Image (cartoon, grey):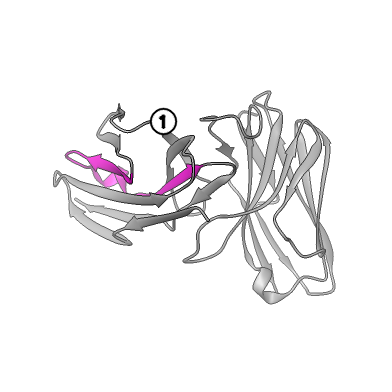
């Protein structure tokens, strides 16, 4: 595996379900990010982890719960979601957080549909 | 608050018809401007980083330029495989993305 991988690629869940999204980066990076991409809207930053520590939570509802056990893996735990949470969820990584000009590399995303 | 506006929202070109995409930004203390390409159902793919006004970068048929208020992505003699959504993002603290320009190149 190379780059940033995400599983599953597609997920359909009911509003009462609990599910988790997984992200793994194979780039030796130390910062990882969760973004939400909805139709006709810019990418929205959700969470940032730098060296396994959460450094940003962009006012995300508590029904989204991130977990970063090490610098290579990032999870997003989902429970009691709403239909408006349906979107493409993207994981990204960079060498470090916040340093000028460090590009982020994105995974392919998980297409989430909440019914 | 950092703002990024991309125009046009959508652009249709004939193969070989050169054009430019615009990214206008308002940010306090620009630390980098990024261009990404996103294909349907995929994550954004990094293209360029620009740091300061006057800087230019090129990759195949793409050339990115930067001024103090905007960036342009010039596409020279595009091919159908250049069809994608092109995203611009500015970095002050976090990255702030624009909504993107959806480019379609017809054969």
Q: Quadrant of residue A86?
A: bottom right
Q: Position of residue A2 (x, y in %)?
A: 61, 28
Q: Position of residue B104 (x, y in %)?
A: 28, 55
The stretch of residues the image draws in magenta is B69-91
Residue at screen point 73% across, 61% down:
A60
Instruction: Report the residue that reaches farthest toward the left.
Output: B17
Q: Quadrant of residue A94?
A: top right
Q: Is residue A49 above or below residue B25?
A: above
In the rendered structure, does residue A33 fall within the stretch colored magenta? no
In the rendered structure, does residue B82 fall within the stretch colored magenta? yes
Q: How many numbered marks does the figure carry?
A: 1
**Circle 1 SS class:** loop
Q: Which residue is mark 1?
A: B51
Q: Is residue A58 above or below residue A12?
A: above
Query: Mark 1, residues whose alpha carbon is within 10 Å: few (<14), some, or many (≥20)?
Result: some
Instruction: Report the residue that reaches farthest toward the top.
Output: A28
Residue at screen point 14% across, 43% down:
B16
Q: Position of residue B57 (x, y in %)?
A: 31, 28
Q: Is residue B83 above or below residue A41?
A: above
Horizontal arrangement in the rendering, residue A56 relative to residue B58 (left or right): right
Residue at screen point 46% across, 48% down:
B27
Horizontal arrangement in the rendering, residue A86 relative to residue B18 (left or right): right
What chain does badge 1 belong to?
B
Q: Main secondary structure of the magenta part?
A: strand
Residue at screen point 29% across, 42% down:
B73
Q: Quadrant of residue A31?
A: top right
Q: Position of residue A76 (x, y in %)?
A: 77, 52
Horizontal arrangement in the rendering, residue A99 relative to residue B16 (left or right): right
Give the camera-side residue of B78 and B26. B26
Give the camera-side residue of B91 and B18. B91
């Amino acid at each position: 595996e190379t780059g940033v991988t995400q599983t599953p690629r597609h997920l359909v869940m009911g509003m009462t379900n609990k599910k988790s999204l997984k992200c793994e980066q194979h780039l030796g990076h130390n910062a990882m990010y969760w973004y939400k991409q909805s139709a006709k809207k810019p990418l929205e930053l959700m969470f940032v982890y730098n060296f396994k520590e959460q450094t940003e939570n962009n006012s995300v509802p508590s029904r989204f719960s991130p977990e970063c056990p090490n610098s290579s893996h990032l999870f997003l735990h989902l429970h009691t979601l709403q239909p408006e949470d349906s979107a493409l969820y993207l994981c990204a990584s960079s060498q470090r957080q916040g340093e000028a000009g460090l590009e982020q590399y994105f995974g392919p995303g998980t297409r989430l549909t909440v019914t | 608050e950092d703002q990024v506006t991309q125009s046009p929202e959508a652009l249709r070109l004939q193969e070989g018809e050169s054009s430019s995409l615009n990214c206008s930004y308002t940010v306090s203390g620009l630390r980098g401007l990024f261009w990404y390409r996103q294909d349907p159902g995929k994550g954004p793919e990094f293209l360029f980083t620009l740091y300061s006004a006057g800087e230019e970068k090129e990759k195949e048929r793409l050339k990115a330029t930067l001024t103090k208020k905007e960036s342009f992505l010039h596409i020279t003699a595009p091919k159908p495989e250049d069809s994608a959504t092109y995203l611009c993002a500015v970095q002050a603290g976090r990255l702030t993305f624009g909504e993107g320009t959806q480019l379609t190149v017809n054969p």
